[in-house]
Amino acid sequence: MTNDIAEFATDTDVFLLIGTNTSECHPIIAMQILRGLERGAKLIVIDPKKTDMAKKADVFIQLPIGYNIPVLNAMINHIIQNDLYDKEFVEKYTHGFEWLKETVKDFTPEKIEKETGIDKELIIKAAEMYAKGNPSAICYTMGITQFTDGTYGVMETSNLALITGNIGKKGGGVNPLRGQNNVQGACDMGALPDVCPGSAKVFNPKTQEKVLELWGYPLNPKPGIPLTKAPHLMEEGKIKFLYVFGENPVMSDPWTEHFIEAVEHLDFFVVQDIFLTETAQRADVVLPAACWGEKEGTFINTARKVQRVRKAVNPPANLDPDWKVICNVAKRMGLKGFDYKSAEDIWNEVRKFDPAKFGGISYERIEKVGINWPCPTEDHPGTPYLYGDHKSFLPDGKFRLAPITYTDDKEKRIIIEKELREKFGIPDDYPAGVGCPSEKPDEVYPCMFTTGRKVFHYHTGTMTRECKPIEYGADMLGAVIEISPDIAEERDIETGDYGLLYNKRGKIAAKVVVNPDLRYGTIFTTFHYAEADGNELANPEDLDPLSNIPPLKMSIANIKKISEEEFFKIRKEILEELEPELAELKRR
Amino acid sequence: MQVVRENKFVIADPKTCIGCATCMAACYQSAYERGKLATPRLIVTRTEHGVMPNQCRQCDDAPCANVCPVGALTFGEDSIELHEEICIGCKLCTIACPFGAIRPASEFMPSVDYRLEPEPALTLESVIGLKTIAVKCDLCKGREEGPACVEACPTGALKIMDPKNQEKMISQKAQKAVEKTVQTGIAN
């Protein structure tokens, strides 16, 4: 996030939530937004599902799945055409305004209405409301990113914030709400294929110098493999060893069946987790570790705030925290430099590695309240909102407006991008691109299918499903498939019937709930439940060309009604495949 | 002067509710700890325009208690009380309740790991040997701190309405309304 969460309650004038079910997936952030609304702030929600936040919104645009770019372009177009943009900001601090202006020209609210049935007045109202807000904040999550054009969707949110001058303002900004307490932290620590701590690229000579100086090892300048490409490489035998920490890829990766098949090809498979997850059941070795309440350390939250966590209880059987397990493995391998005494030791090394961001954040200073990076020195107060000086992180200090257009045909994507670049003379290293849908409904699979979270469960349910008040208390329904009323009517399905949801990649069976909050032709389910995991149907191909993220939020599928008997049969098959250890126990 | 007996009740404010269902988890835990049937007594309900938990309003002339054939539902001191051990599971109360706040339910046996059963337990109804009874909000009777849901609600959307503070609230509102009329009357 460019801004801090607390600013939502105190400073934000207009909220634009796009592709986020904030109250279900980020209840704490939703609380701050609600405080803002109570203060008189306005709320715009853009989502295929009429979420609880949408029900509280001043403007709600129910767009088709994966149609973010045209809608955002139409808003940008309306703002530019009606002179609602911040001319001073655009002129002084940005590049490429003319390119953007010309690119979005075709995207009129009228065109959007013609293509999708969204009332053009809604788009105009949203655009005007956002442009007039002082400041306006954009929040987004996976409803923007997990598409084949996810990165371009993110660039569009940045365009919108830049032309209205909402960057570098308290309460404004572009705010990706991270999915976990420590995603920001994991990325900052270099848990990505191509970076070291502090987002320093591995192929950068400066990074290599630093690594050699600090750790005494030469750094491989070749970026690693993104997770989404790993299953293919495992099949080809190019990855022979896999070590999974606290993740459950059997359930969280798209096209579950493929991943399960791929791990069979590994020579050795290690899982480190606190429970015997679906993934751990397939491992050669499972290493236990202390859980979040049983260890010391820091988390970096979505607002870049470094926060201390403290041990509440002792881990069972004197288990070690994850860092210690890794150090022990490294020592057994004969590696030097893993003699840390505590989590604080490691943090102090991080401060040395990237002093510009973390240099001033000592354990003493975050004893009670966290500090947002960048914080270079001990007397620096931290940076709750970025770009206060209107300077970007780019060498010339200017922000770039990225011209993004849209096509219905993904095959034409590369040609259109080429045309776009040639038309305006955009250099190759300047961000510009073409959005497109990864799959379109056809005769066999006429419904759009997307996944999401339920408020009471966390991801693949590894932890929350072990908690009885949550599993039996808050979550009374269990795994369900939600369908829009038109799909239900066409197939004569009622709430409470059993349904089989299927596409070319997989199938799941569950009870059906007819949900009028969904846009027509849409099916929704979660990825919390091993017995009915929406990711079995998700698309692992059509990766985003820039970030390699698969279009997890957009697939095509079909649904049919099944009898209770059939349902039992399918459920049993799925469970046996997914939980081999459990199935083995049952047979005994 | 006529003495009026009024029940307490828990109610949510849909404006502040974010539908997080923490109340349901707290409710389950409270019921479990007090030895009651472990299932939530309030259900977060989504409608076209919003979301909030729905639970028993503890009606003073409660239709559920009036129809109960065995006296499992009785008029208590400050609420409608349900005696779980007497309930025969006839479900008449669920028909009588105008709020849909009372429902038949049963619970999993804590000692059985249903995942290891030969047939996976999908819903409680499919498990043989469970008795179904009516469940409704009992204001966490026996819990010193009062209703667990009110305590757990992170946004303060859930409130307990006491006859005493209700009187105060009504008179405050009346004062305000009269004051407004009087003032506008003078202005005219």
Image (cartoon, helix red, strand yellow):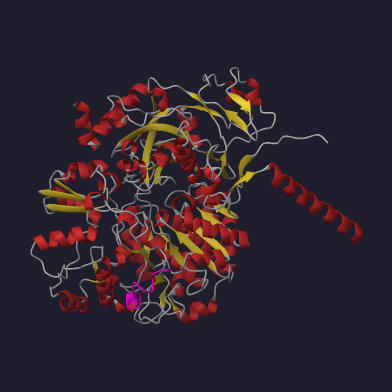
Q: Is residue B63 left or right of residue A202?
A: right
Q: Position of residue A543 (x, y in %)?
A: 29, 54
Quarter of the image holding residue A365? bottom left
Q: Position of residue A278 (x, y in %)?
A: 25, 42
Residue at 23% x, 58% y: name it. A322
Q: Is residue A133 visible?
A: yes
Q: Tell me the quarter of the image containing the N terminus of chain B.
A: top right
Q: Is residue A36 left or right of residue A214?
A: right
Secondary structure mainly formed by the magenta segment: loop
Q: Is residue B110 above or below residue A67?
A: above
Q: Nearer the viewer, residue A129 or A275?
A: A275
Quarter of the image holding residue B91? top right
Residue at 38% x, 51% y: name it. A437
The answer to if A588 sits in the magenta stretch is no
Q: Nearer the viewer, residue A546 or A371?
A: A371
**Which span of residues is magenta-colored?**
A357-369
Q: Position of residue A28 (x, y in %)?
A: 48, 56
Residue at 31% x, 60% y: name it. A414
Q: Tell me the quarter of the image containing the C terminus of chain B.
A: bottom right
What residue occupies the far top of the structure in this picture?
A: B69
Q: Is residue A37 above or below residue B96?
A: below
Q: Is residue B188 visible?
A: no
Q: Position of residue A263 (x, y in %)?
A: 17, 46
The answer to if A363 sits in the magenta stretch is yes
